[in-house]
Amino acid sequence: NAGVTQTPKFRILKIGQSMTLQCAQDMNHNYMYWYRQDPGMGLKLIYYSVGAGITDKGEVPNGYNVSRSTTEDFPLRLELAAPSQTSVYFCASSYSSSSSTDTQYFGPGTRLTVL
Amino acid sequence: KNQVEQSPQSLIILEGKNCTLQCNYTVSPFSNLRWYKQDTGRGPVSLTIMTFSENTKSNGRYTATLDADTKQSSLHITASQLSDSASYICVVRPTGTASKLTFGTGTRLQVTL
């Protein structure tokens, strides 16, 4: 299993540009998540999905959109990029969230810089 | 507001030595507490998960303890190795929030020769 994969690894955007961060998992996990990690801060949940066709906002959803058309893929869309969106983005997945001890498996991250 | 605070922020130890990292949380009620290891440039990897009823859990040279009464947890690393150099993140899952975890800011550990 490749686990959770993310592309690209690095990206530089200009203010106002848009892009999609890709995330895929091959573990047949129902739950998928997007986090951002800013320097010196804990990970913050952006959006999450409990299954294909179902998504919900996390703690910091403004400026982002997601979709979940398949179990495997969970892309994150940035519209009108702003410098405040400069961060490292992590995608994660878990089999379920109903179990109190479900483990989230993280991808390698995408480092995004908005100039 | 639910918070998770970790100390120290950073730590340097010699290879072979032991160390203990601290985590204090205000999340209540909580379902479980996790410790993750994050290597530089990589995603976090789960080390341990403890429910509120568990006091200790080990994973090789890593031993986590939990005191739900004082809302404190610690991660003890025994006989440190260079490969232990990483950030260690304490994460708490509140009860009833399903997918929403509260992450600490991490302790940056450097193991040197």
Image (spheres, rainbow, N blue to C red):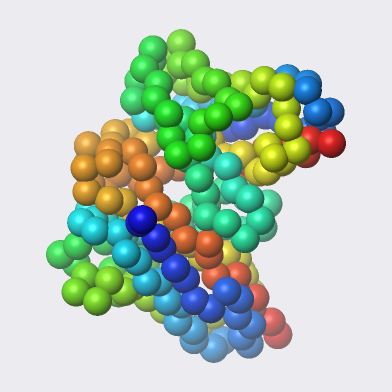
Q: Is residue A4 visible?
A: no
Q: Residue at x 55, y 21 (%)?
A: A65
Name the side, left or right, on which B99 lies relative to B106. Answer: left
Residue positioned 42% across, 76% down in the render: B22
Q: For residue A104, which quarter of the picture?
A: top left
Specify whether residue B86 is in view. Answer: yes
Residue B38 position within the rendered picture, expressed as x and y whole percent measured from the top left: 56, 57
Judge from the rendering whether residue B82 lies leftward or rightward of residue B94; answer left or right.
right
Q: In which quadrant is the N terminus of chain B drawn? A: bottom left
Locate the C terminus of chain B by quadrant: bottom right
Is B86 on the left or on the right of A34, as rendered? right
Rendering quarter of residue B10: bottom right
Q: Is residue B62 above or below residue B43?
A: below
The residue positioned 60% from the left and 70% from the top of the image is B108
* On screen, residue B37 above or below B8: above
- Number of marks in the rendered image: 0
Residue at 67 percent across and 20 percent down: it is: A79
